[in-house]
Image: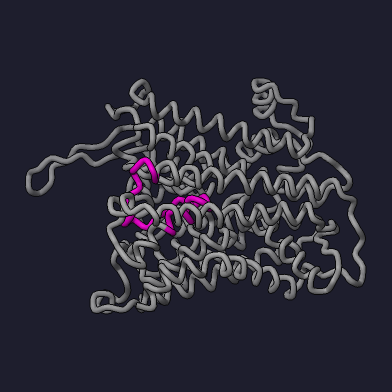
Amino acid sequence: MNATVAGLLQIGVLLIALAAAYRPLGDYMAKVYTSKKHLKVERAIYRVTKVNPDNEQKWTTYAAGVLGISFVSIALLYLMMRFQPLLPFNFGRGAVDSGTAFNTAVSFVTNTNWQSYVPEVVMGHSVQMLGLTVQNFLSAAVGMAVAIALIRGFTRNGSDRLGNFWVDLVRGTVRILLPFAAISAVVLIAGGVVQSLTSGVDVTSVDGSAHTIALAPTASQEAIKELGTNGGGIFNANSAHPFENPNSFTNLFEIFLLLVIPVSLTRTFGVLVGNKRQGYVLLSVMGVLFAALLTVTWLSEANANGVAAAAAGGAMEGKEQRFGVAGSALWAIATTGTSTGAVNSMHDSFSGLGGGMTMLNILFGEVTPGGVGTGLYGILVVAIIAMFLAGLMVGRTPEYLGKKLGRREVTCAAISILAMPTVVLVGTGLTMMMPGELSAALTNSGPHGLSEVLYAFASAGNNNGSAFAGLTVTSPWFQGALGMAMLFGRLIPILAVLCLAGSLAAQKKVPETSGTLPTTGPLFASMLGGTIVLVAALTFIPALALGPIAEALA
């Protein structure tokens, strides 16, 4: 079959699957977060943790819960890695060094899943299952909880309460992530993904030499890795490894998993605010940007310059033959647009333009469609900025979904948006001023070397986790700097969003008038998409011009 036709069929099947899941999953998630009933297992958790599930919280208390579980999780995960020799299923793998343990703990708690180590060599199964996989669930559930809190800010009228963080966290985990991940793991096993508690199998190659092929409980981690838009692989090659992603079926199914919740959350948003068209507008903006980035990336990789690329029918360096250019491009844009960070090809080997598109997708703030929860609250923050700009143009106090957008609301939105560029550009700038670090870390000089560093901090600051593989990040500077980028890139926007939610909830809704800008039509969709592109362009074009743009033009 022609490669282009095969690629289009993949996209068609993916769109049909997402469309089929959109309404039932979106409606189900809306019911999960509005139900007055608590399941028996949830009540047991509340009793053990001394939580009163019927008490609602102010935004400050809600934020304290997010910070509390984040820092406790970092500490516990760090200790698990440092004391790995005392845990079962360690297979003789020693304690993880302090720098890697800190970086990894922050990475998995912030839903980044940046990995500066070889998982099948460094981590035993206990750390993988009880540490990293548990955080895959919790970090995703935290993102959904924050998104739901922001939606409550729009729907509540003169209230200082946003719900109960612990209830939202438990429900997101127990009612959404756990059951869907369990079903997905079974599907992946049926598709050929490995699931084993042994450390590996000994084999003898054709030349008589002995080797050990690493094994792991892969399918159970792969399911939540994609469903929760996490991205950390249990093998060093991540989703390019045949044990994690063996064939074209699993490749497409895993792309579906990482997109399905972020896409369906727009339906949840529409249901909860009482106007489903509001969710459709957000989804349309996400879809148009996604399609544009995918088109440019696919064309760039399929028509890359060079004799080798022409002979291979595309830029096949760093790509798996079983996925090809189309499957690799689709995966790359899906993961960089969802804060997932999983890779089935090496972005460092993409063409200058193709690699630039993956980086730009991250720098958009990962709202195409974004991570689990983070994509929804991220695009809603941009919507508030867009409405503020529209208000300035017509000389009217802006409002969105019946809530006035005053100084406090716009300040919170601005902090949320500016936190990531600050982390990315400051981190990249400081690193480029350290020739000693660069000489040891970079394998490429010139524009591509800058692209590798910029991509690393963009990935960390946006809690993505993918990387340009030509950069070595095992030095104390990179472990610490990228760890702090992940932490600030995750927590500062969350605090700003919760502050925004509290401010919105305290307001009384204002009725629509003839001067109210409609937010369910193409005009607002164009404004929203334009604001996403404009903010990214004004912030990052100078840096991109020195890196991927210069490389593409060369």
Q: Nearer the viewer, residue 16 or 117?
A: 117
- Magenta stretch: residue 374 in it? no
Classify residue 346 as left or right of residue 32: left
The residue depicted at 80 percent of the width and 52 percent of the height is 154
Q: Is residue 169 above or below residue 84?
A: below
Magenta segment boundaries in residue numbering: 454-478
Q: Can residue 100 be seen from the camera position used here?
A: yes
| Residue 518: quarter of image | bottom right
The residue depicted at 58 percent of the width and 42 percent of the height is 177
Residue extending farthest to the left is 207
Residue 77, x across and y down, in percent: 47, 31
The residue depicted at 71 percent of the width and 67 percent of the height is 281
| Residue 348: quarter of image | bottom left
Classify residue 402 as left or right of residue 82: right
Residue 517, x across and y down, in percent: 82, 70
- Give the mark count: 0
**What colour scheme has been applied to the protein in the rendered image?**
one colour
Specify the quadrant that holds the N terminus: bottom left
Q: Can residue 340 be seen from the camera position used here?
A: no
Q: Nearer the viewer, residue 272 or 554?
A: 554
Specify the quadrant that holds the C terminus: bottom left
Residue 504, x across and y down, in percent: 81, 50
Residue 501, x across and y down, in percent: 76, 47
Q: Is residue 364 above or below residue 461?
A: below
| Residue 62: quarter of image | top right
Q: Nearer the viewer, residue 493 or 269?
A: 493
- Magenta stretch: residue 463 in it? yes
Q: Is residue 395 above or below residue 151?
A: below
